[in-house]
Image (tube, helix red, strand yellow):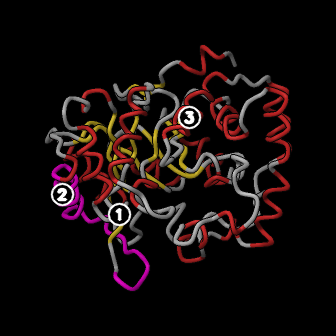
Amino acid sequence: MTTSTQSKPRTLGSSDLSVLPIGLGCMSLSGAYGKSNDDEAIRVIHHAIDRGVNFLDSSDMYGWGHNETLIGKALAGGRRGKVVLATKFGQTQQPGGANGVDGSPAYVKAACDASLKRLGVDVIDLYYQHRVDPSVPIEDTVGAMGELVKAGKVRALGLSEAKPETIRRAHKVHPLAAVQSEYSLLYREHAEETLKTTRELGISYVAYSPLGRSLLTGTVRQASDIPEGDGRGRHPRFAADNLSSNLAKTAAIEAVAREKGCKPGQVALAWLLAQGADIVPIPGTKRAERIDENVAALGVALSADEVAKLSSALPPGAAAGTRYPEGGMKGVYL
């Protein structure tokens, strides 16, 4: 794949939404990975936009409204028209317990109105159901989401962490522009199984945590590298034995990076981009220099042999530790 092809804007499904092939996941700007600073977060968003990043990904559960409010502030003053704005609904706050989920039609509409207000916008470009609600038929949820499109509040629809059968049923009710799930060299199984369906239906695939929550960047060498209060400390992939196993597997990425004179994270992103023009990674960061690093991955072209070498070194199922703690795994791929 040539660099020019890799840098070409990617259209989300059959929608008219066109994005730089690398977007910005905004969850880390609301305390998910330790303390965050709003002023610095706004500067990071502005820097991303200045660098051509035009795909911002949020959710109403990131900081329980904080993230959307933050993005609204960042886009005020003339920047709204420069981005494709995505947000999600469906997870509900349950103090003292695991998050709940609500896919009822009434909740869909109420959640959208609340997000629009926090974001300070008239329309959301891409609206996802964040987690599938097993107690509500997906046809009912997506039917209500479709009504938002008709009302002019949303431009395009998506699902997050939905399995192929659910995607098919939803797409029959209203065309989906994108499906979002974790996808990286470290975690491939659910994504690559889902891609068979999204490609058949013409749906784009938005890859969150494309850097394995930093495991593929070479910046984490031991558990103590994760700051106190950082949500990664609860993830099985960072547990002692799992961490050492996962780091050993990433040696192949670092070897390619050394050969190319680039960063391991850039190789990991380039591998994803090489999987197809329907894939859009959305790495998250709290630092402007990481924006620069991630965007520069568009200039890292991997040969077919290099892609195959990496795929072989980290095959599906190679990761030690599940994508989420046990409770969280019950809510994905539904």
Question: Is 33 placed left or right of 12 in the picture?
Answer: right
Q: Which of marks 2 and 3 is nearer the N terminus?
A: 2
Q: How crowded is mark 1: few (under 14 residues within 10 Å), some or many (20 or more)?
A: some
Give amino acid for label 2.
Answer: Ala
| Location of residue 53 (image quadrant) | top left
Residue closer to the observer: 16 or 261: 261
Residue 196 in the image, given as x and y percentages of width and height: 61, 41
Residue 152 in the image, given as x and y percentages of width and height: 16, 38
Q: Earlier in the sequence, mark 1 or mark 2?
A: 1
Foreground: disc 1 or disc 2: 1
The residue singled out by tag 1 in the image is 63
The residue singled out by tag 2 in the image is 114
Compared to 173, does 309 lie above or below? above
Give the CA separation, mark 1 to mark 2.
14 Å
Give the position of the N terminus as an image quadrant: top right
Give amino acid for label 1.
Answer: Gly
Secondary structure beneath label 3: strand
- Residues rendered magenta in the picture: 95-117
Secondary structure beneath label 2: helix
Give amino acid for label 3.
Answer: Ile
Compared to 297, does 40 lie above or below? below
The residue singled out by tag 3 in the image is 279
Foreground: disc 2 or disc 3: 2
Give the CA separation, mark 2 to mark 3.
29 Å
Give the CA separation, mark 3 to mark 1.
27 Å
Foreground: disc 3 or disc 1: 1
